Image (spheres, rainbow, N blue to C red):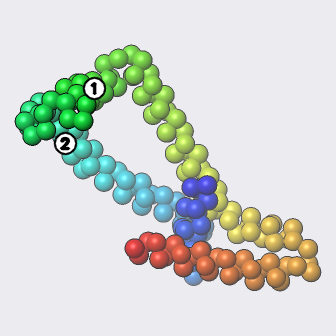
Amino acid sequence: VWAILAAYIIMPLVNYVNNRLRVPRFFVVLLIYVVVFSAIVVVSRYLVPWLSNQITFFVEDLPKLQGSLVNKVGQTPLGINISKVIAEVESNLGAPTQNPKSATKLLTSAFSALLRILIFLFTTFYLLMDGPRIRRSLVRMVPLAYRPEVLRLSKQINSSWMQYIRGELIL
């Protein structure tokens, strides 16, 4: 579903560059993928170390935060034992790499996420490459008597969806 939505959003750009500038569709899609991957690499280059530092600082400050919290609300506000909560947070932050079961679960989750991302990328690539051909095939499946009405309706739906997506992106 996400691949369909991504292809739907990117398709006007691909069509414009392909039709107006006469760049082959494959190269347009490839260029979009290169730009997106480059942006992800650049952002992750700076975001991952920053996020890692923030988590490290949080873990280091956890005892101070616990003391401050206990001083303000007591050891068991509303029946919640703060020491147990803090101990659980600390164990969960260190657990993914210390416990073999947790490490296996983490690797399985990472592999699953990677597989989903690859399926998303391949599906989006396929839809961007063959989108016009898929649309023509679907239109040919509609009986001739209904074709003009279906085409008019699909243009109205497309226009409404694009306006909605533009509005959401602006907000």
Along the viewing direction, whichever of 126 and 103 lies nearer the viewer: 103
Question: Which residue is depicted at the point 92% across and 80% down?
Answer: 145
- Given the image, on which type of amino acid does mark 1 rest? Glu
Along the viewing direction, whichever of 159 and 18 lies nearer the viewer: 159
- At which x and y percent is residue 137? 81, 66
Q: Name the residue under label 1.
A: 88
Along the viewing direction, whichever of 157 and 34 lies nearer the viewer: 157
Apparent side of residue 131 relative to residue 15 in the rendered image (left or right): right
In the image, residue 31 above or below residue 79: below
Callout 1 secondary element: helix
In the image, residue 53 above or below residue 37: above
Answer with mark 1 or mark 2, whichever residue precedes in sequence: 2
- Identify the image quadrant of the N terminus: bottom right
- At which x and y percent is residue 116? 55, 42
- At which x and y percent is residue 153? 74, 80
Disc 1 + disc 2, Cβ < 8 Å: no
- At which x and y percent is residue 29? 55, 63
- Given the image, on which type of amino acid does mark 2 rest? Gln
User: Could you give the CA–CA distance between mark 1 and mark 2, rounded to whole angstroms?
Assistant: 19 Å
Q: Mark 2 points at which residue?
A: 54
Image quadrant assignment for residue 131: bottom right
Question: Which residue is depicted at the point 48% across and 58% down?
Answer: 33
